[in-house]
Amino acid sequence: MKRLLTIILALLAAMSLFASGSSEAASDSSDDTIKIALIIENTIDDKGWCQAMHDGITQAMEMLPGKIEYNYAEKMAVVDAGSMARQYVAEGYDLIIAHGAQYKNTILEMAEEYPDVSFAFGTSSEIGPDNVFTYMPESEETGYINGIIAGSLTKADIVGLVGPVDSGDAARYNRGYVLGVQSVNPDCKILVAHTGSFSDYVKSAEVATSQLASGADMMTGSSQQAIGALRATAESPTAMWVGQDLAQLTTPEGQAKCIAASSYNYAAVIVGLVEKLEAGIKGGECIPMNFNNGGFVFEYNPALEAEWVSPELKAKVDEQIAAFKASAGVLSDWASVDYSTL
Amino acid sequence: MIEMLVNMLSMCIPFSVALLLASLGEMFNQRAGVFNLGCEGMMAMGAFIGMLIPFSAGGGGAVSQWYNVLGFIAAGVLGAFLGLFFGVVTVTFRAPQGIAGIGLQMFGVGTAGTLFRHFVGGTQSIPGIPDISIPFLSSIPFLGDVFFSHNGAVYLAYLFVPLAWYILFKTPWGLKVRAVGTNPRAADSMGINVSRTRYEALMLGGALAGLAGAYLSIAQAKMFSDTLISGRGFIAVALVYFGHWHPLQIMGGALLFTFAQTFQTQIQSMGISFPYELAVMLPYILVIVVLSFTSRNQTTAPTALGKPFNREIRT
């Protein structure tokens, strides 16, 4: 018995080491507070997909002081997400965001079971039930901007692209990138390859190394696995990178190699969702994200801008962003891009 | 076309190292009669500790190469310790090896990810070890790029292949390992300590798995995340069967698998009209096909593989 107790105490002591930092709650609850829960497959600091949403929610909390109470659950496989969502429902959360298309079935089942709670998942362009919001980043726009930069700056007339899978916002970003490159450099060879995974950093680096060896001198990649490709690009003395997430600019290799990056501005989406919830709208809408509605942000790397971004290139980028801001759906033909013709 | 082939071959060798080391480690385990599905977990722990040391020293910035060496050593030691732990479970307590291996895999991957979040935080990179162009040899056309322009760990890993062969087939300890994996009762009657030999093989195998993980985090990806290994530990187990428990054939398997990986990447990048989903599966399909065709020729398989040894029980 004494031995058993010793083992239990030792395990508890070990677990206490890791007890902190698994979630964060913000302001005190009040009747006006909207309680938002986030369920993600990776982590809040993955420098990609999950971090973008987490950062958006925390920014929205700053924009709406005292209005949002927030909690999150990381590393949630699809099979675990339902159980986690039920816990959040039991704790009285108003909006449960499952950040990934893979959670669709779980969320639709939960929405039917708990009609008074609002749910959201994305990317999806489907219109869900009355208590389900969907969101779809029209990331062909950010890809197009990065494509303009890559197509303009490549000296070898070869650019590379490391994608995860050919679906969702990654497919849109990748095809937008192709269109952007072709708009400024029609003869440029565009190497496109997918790793088949959102999180296999090693394979992403291997694909990037392969494309760099084939002569690519401007690289990009989508989803969190792109960090592996960026790391591989950093090994090249000449190749540069354009990023799909602003968090990439904060990494050492991003600071050295990433000329510019765009990112999803989920803060605008979250603020919009809070306003809808307050107006009594619990779902039944798909929220597009684009430059037109403030869903995207774009930044140059201050350390590289002067050296790499000429006034002409900057004017071209500014002009295109202005066109995107003026009207949504400018690149409605993005899906027509066929990689086999590149 | 030749340039593309040179590129593919020159990437094959460094990219195959993690699989090679992990497979050789698993080979020693299986030659001693222990089936270790926990290779993935050992690699994850090795990758974590291997990256942690240079990261802690430099905060992600440049550090002396000795910290990378220290990272490799720590990964090897931690892997050996996990091998010892696996030995306690499967050799001393005679737990079912398959289940214990799956447990070790989950323990290793989960613990590495948890410790990483606690001590490091989010996805982080390190400078890692640079490639070395060997003077004169690296300038030989074709051969220079393929064989003589890699990081130091690559050369050491490939030098270990003949060493592994020598240890297994030319030393008394190698003979003991093969004996306890083939007929532990006969080995026991000849005075060989079966449990001790299996413990030693597991520790060597664990050390190699730890080094394989550290290679990924220090020399190849130069970063860590809890998805870094992404099934490579299981591929390593398959490559042992693929290579018929022989170091040279395992090396061939690791190279063939990696070549298929780089080949599918090239197919995609060339814009050939071929579904990328099938291209990504190509290396795995290759392993299954080769295993299917070679499964009848398993004469070198350790006959006591997966069977706990109990001197007191007659079978």
Image (tube, rainbow, N blue to C red):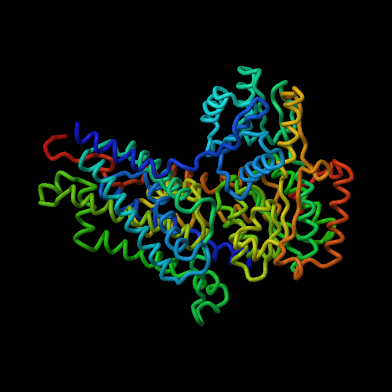
Across and down, in percent, residue B215 comes to 44, 60
Quarter of the rendering containing residue B263: bottom right
Picture residue at 34% right of the left edge, 58% below the top: B76
Picture residue at 38% right of the left edge, 67% below the top: B159
Across and down, in percent, residue A276 comes to 75, 28
Q: Is residue B294 visible?
A: no
- Give the vertical position of A48 relative to B69 (above or below): above
Q: Nearer the viewer, residue A258 or B19?
A: A258
Across and down, in percent, residue B61 comes to 53, 66
Picture residue at 55% right of the left edge, 32% below the top: A78
Q: Is residue B174 visible?
A: yes
- Using residue B265 as the reference point, say whether residue A312 is left or right of it: right
Across and down, in percent, residue B128 comes to 49, 65
- Using residue A205 as the reference point, say whether residue B36 is left or right of it: left
Q: Nearer the viewer, residue B27 or A205?
A: A205
Q: Nearer the viewer, residue B232 or B296?
A: B232
Count of numbered marks: 0
Quadrant in which the C terminus of chain A is drawn: bottom right
- Give the vertical position of A127 relative to B276 (above or below): above
